[in-house]
Amino acid sequence: MSKVLVIGAGGVGSVAVHKMAQLPEVFSSITLASRRESSCQKVAKSVEERFGVKVETAEVDADFVEQTTRLIERVKPDLLVNLALPYQDLTLMDACLETGTPYLDTANYEPKDEAKFEYRWQWEYQERFEKAGLMALLGSGFDPGVTNVFTAWLRKHHFDRIDTLDILDCNGGDHGHPFATNFNPEINIREVTAPARHWEDGNWVETPALSYNHTFDFPQVGERNMYLMYHEELESLVKHFPEIQRARFWMTFGDAYLKHLEVLQNVGLTSIEPVMYQGHEIIPLQFLKAVLPDPGGLGERTKGKTCIGNIVTGEKSGQSVTKYLFNVCDHEECFREVGSQAVSYTTGVPAMIGAALVVQGIWQGRGVFNMEQMDPDPFMDMLNHHGLPWEVRDLDQAPQF
């Protein structure tokens, strides 16, 4: 029986709290905090109506260590679950160190003024968390998160050596808007417009954003165009599995999305450089975020499925092996269960599972850890029992892309 403090009441935070409420034997007390307590209260009301569980709410600005520290000291949680913005990772980790509280997040830190996704800043906390006897678990979402665990599980059970890794992320859903993002627009657009990078033969290879694509037939979704891009789990996976010769990340985008994105880029609305407007300094991308549809409100109108998984090649007992391990998630089923679309669901459920494993002591350690460093088996088992069942298939050959 454990207390958790969840920071962030967006789509992912809402899903995680709804799923935690379904495990009262693990999470005896849940506090949800955000910059606007009204957002937390909306989530808490939904949880109570659906599951009869009371969620405490609070207001906090996670940009400030002092505010978070005061909240932690009042709540006294066994774990802080950071589902806020990745800009706030380091201040929340500082607050956890000050209060002696274990830490978990779903996305690695990036500076506000540069679209640069790196684990370096958080890995530098290793010694401080180790000396404090605390665990910090990074990236307990889907990608990163489940895709890291998929890799570790395949390596443990099906490979003696991994040669290549391709992570394929497909959202086959349709929300009916001309242009909208399925998670925080600011983070989504920064990711998509950044240069692509993949790992090959011991080096990072950089290519222009969205310059390389391939068609793939996704289970239960069908053929979609997927684009090579950089994603943070590649950095930790090639570090912890140095045998990997090539690692790539692919994400699908529809033609309408890419057309709108190109126009927005051309007129400067995806920029993170400040501009002056009527005597005020604004960030164009933050303004764009304010006028786009709220991802948290897309659930009721989104239909279709997501399919996210790993294709891994390598060797087992002297034989060449290719495996495809994936999950398919239905947008409408997610909305019926927790009032959310599948993109938030596929991140919020793994956050709950990671939190459950940490507070129960099933996953434990001193220092900063990525998901693939943990035993994958209990996590994989919980995926099957909490809404994200997976399937593994043998493929005749490595992917030809």
Image: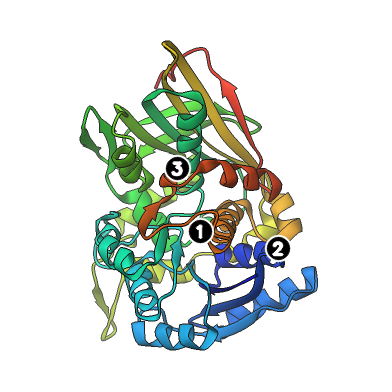
The residue beneath circle 2 is 23
Tell me the SS state at disc 2. loop
Quarter placement of the C terminus: top left
Measured as percent of width and height from the top left, residue 75 is found at: 54, 84
Whether residue 236 can be seen here: yes
Measured as percent of width and height from the top left, residue 93 is found at: 36, 71
The residue beneath circle 1 is 183
Identify the residue shown where x is 27% and y is 34%.
199
Q: Which mark is residue 148?
A: 3
Q: Amino acid at mark 2?
A: Leu
Whole-angstrom CA distance, mark 1 to mark 2, is: 25 Å
Q: Amino acid at mark 3?
A: Asn
Whole-angstrom CA distance, mark 2 to mark 3, is: 24 Å
Q: Is residue 193 above or below residue 226?
A: below
Measured as percent of width and height from the top left, residue 159 is found at: 45, 24
Q: Is residue 156 above or below residue 274?
A: above
Nearest the viewer among 98 and 263 is 98
Whole-angstrom CA distance, mark 1 to mark 3, is: 20 Å
